[in-house]
Amino acid sequence: MLALLIALVLVAAVVGIVVTTLRFARQNGRPRAGQICWLAVPLLVLAGLATLCVLGLYQGGPVEPIVLVAAALGSSQVVLRRERILADVTAWGEKRGWSQPQTHTRFTAVALLAGAVLGHLAVELPYNYEIIWMAPQYALLQVLIILLAIGVLHFLFQRRGAGMFVGACLCFVIGLAQFFIASFKSAAILPNDLFVLGTAAAVSGGYTYAIGGGVVLGLAALLLAAAVGSLVTPAPAASRGRRVAANLGCSAALLATLVALVTVPSYFDTLGVQMKYWYSLDYYRKQGFITSFVAVAQDLPIDVPEGYDEDDVSKLEASYVERYDEGEGASEERAAAEGQFDAERPSVICIMNESFADLSELDGASWGYDGPSFVGSADDALAQGSLNVSVLGGGTCNTEFEFLTGVSLAYVGDGKYPYSLYDLSVAPSLARQFSDLGYETTAMHPNYATNWNRDRVYEALGFDEFLSIDDFAGDEVYHSGVSDAATYDKCLELLENSDEPQFIFDVTMQNHSGYDQNNLGDVEQYHVDGLSDYDNARLSEYLACIDESDRALEEFLDELEELDRPVVVVFFGDHQPALSTILEAALNGEQVYDESGNAIAGGTGGGDASGDAEATLETYRSSYLIWANYDVAGCAQDGRELDASPAYLGALTAGMIGAPLTDFQKAQLAIREDMPAVSLLGTALADGTWVSADDGDALPQAYDDLAQITYLEFASKLR
């Protein structure tokens, strides 16, 4: 009923504008063609919103349409009285001793500035309900960007008001698009989304495009921009022809200035713009769509390694491939594993376990913790040990990216989130690799499909199917979500339902922070001197989660032992919890809390190495395990311990079980002989020495070689 009443008000406003226009025509003569065009804008907007109301596609309140009606009526009055207003402006200028050209120029400048402010509102109002709390410096920066863009269009349109209005319309379209993306996915539009517009268009038909009150306010800003634009007139006709070239020159100059503004200063480093991609929409609201979008766009490029030449790097990669083929690749063990793989075609289940790590490595003996009872001590594992990761306390998707692509974050850049930045359809992919071998490929994550853009990323990486939270309805819940055991049951279900070999990637959820939920019942309590009771309780809750994950994995592997089909399991943790940093600080005798009890020691767990500069290498390690339910030819399966990193893990597994290797993987395995692990923090050498990424002179040649090869295999292919 409310929607119909709003529609009636809007229709009444349309009628009012039409009647006013007819009355004006009787008194002053027929409006000019330009005035009729400007009058059409509020009429079309009001009629369009009335239609949406009738169709039930307006979901806002009554206030916003009233604001729109006021803007429409005001806009129409400005258009009808344009000549009088311009005459009054000229007279006002004459009183101040300005010539008519001076008055015209100054008025146009003010109009363009007003248009930029209204363009800013047209962008932000549709989606940004926090606009009044936007950081003023970024709002001003966004207005400046819009002002330059409107200036470009102003001169391109030969100083007609239509140029400014087109700019305002583009701003509104951006805001409207962000409104729908925020409504459908609770996410911001990022530059890499432009690479998949075709895919977005293909799936766009399944949504209901209803608008809210913010969109209507954005339309109101657009109507006010139309009113201002109607007052912007070109130079007198006699001089117009001579000024075409000059106008185009001004447009080009402003375009160059605009390009410089969005490319020269670093928005992150120089202007202080911030971004956490998990909360991208929040940052867009705080800093403005355009400001944030430009900052992210600047973050897209991956630095080209010094001296990079595609032909030379191809030869470099070939030399490492040859080294592998003549070494490990030519061994009897590898030949036996290859023959067995071709004959058996084992299924491969990869489990990235949320926050799984062995905190006993943080001097566990001093506080009575021995670590997980199974992971790390499985005597029949193909390999197990510490995994050198690039993230801490967050940034799950980056460990995931490294594992699935073989691309180390060391060669992408600190603070970058490839799942949010790049089109990964061109990236190396374990899923695509096994799919090409005839495997059925499934990704699963018992949470929202849109988290870290997984719904789009998994498709780009070549997975056939993605099971998200909707596929785990009614399943067992533990701590922060669907239990590990429930996801393992889903893996068994997939194996039971198909005789084809499977590649399954399982991203678990149960161990996710926070660790102050007190929802596990009685758990073993640990006490570390220097930690508060609250943080000791959090530590105990976290370790209880790890114990449950450890138990569930051992039980799952026992069930796989009973299957009559070969299965390989790759299990690894994505990162340590953020509380590891204060745990380590307490163990080192550092001050952990300030006088108010707030933690001041260690990193913040921001998700990447740069965010946790004070945290040491030990907090950037998780655990991994490679296991099989059959005797893998050529492999001792004696639980040997090997240091590794997520980017190596896929190649390491494929090499052990005899799966075909890509040239990139062969090069990785050859390089791994000199450099067993690599992450954002640095690299491990063959003798166990760790070299920081900041110590360029001490980094081995293999580090630079892998940078060149990784750029060839990944970054050079990005569009």
Image: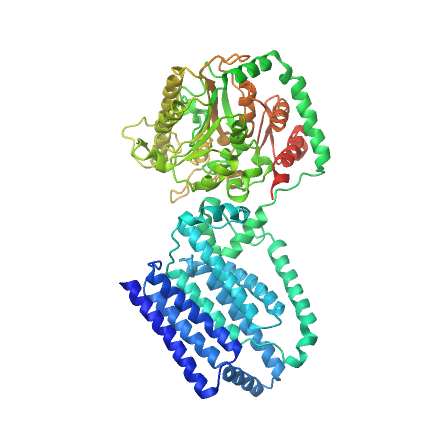
The residue closer to the viewer here, 415 or 314, is 314
Residue 358, visible in the rendered structure: yes
The quarter of the displayed image where residue 69 is located: bottom left
Nearest the eye: 157 or 378:
157
Q: Residue at x 64, y 39 (%)?
A: 716
Q: Position of residue 483 (x, y in %)?
A: 34, 30
Image quadrant in which you'd find residue 359: top left
Q: Is residue 241 above or below residue 308?
A: below
Q: Residue 175, how many percent across, how many down?
A: 47, 58
The picture places residue 42, in percent across and down from the top left corner, at: 43, 71
| Residue at 56% over, 53% down | 294
Total marks placed = 0
Q: Residue at x 48, y 67 (%)?
A: 118
Which of these two is toward me, 14 or 90?
Answer: 14
667 left or right, relative to 551? right
**Quarter placement of the C terminus:** top right
Image height check: is 304 above or below 58?
above
What colouring method underlies this structural image?
rainbow
Q: Position of residue 601 (x, y in %)?
A: 46, 38
Snapshot quadrant of residue 473? top left
- In which quadrant will I find the N terminus? bottom left
Q: Is residue 606 visible?
A: no
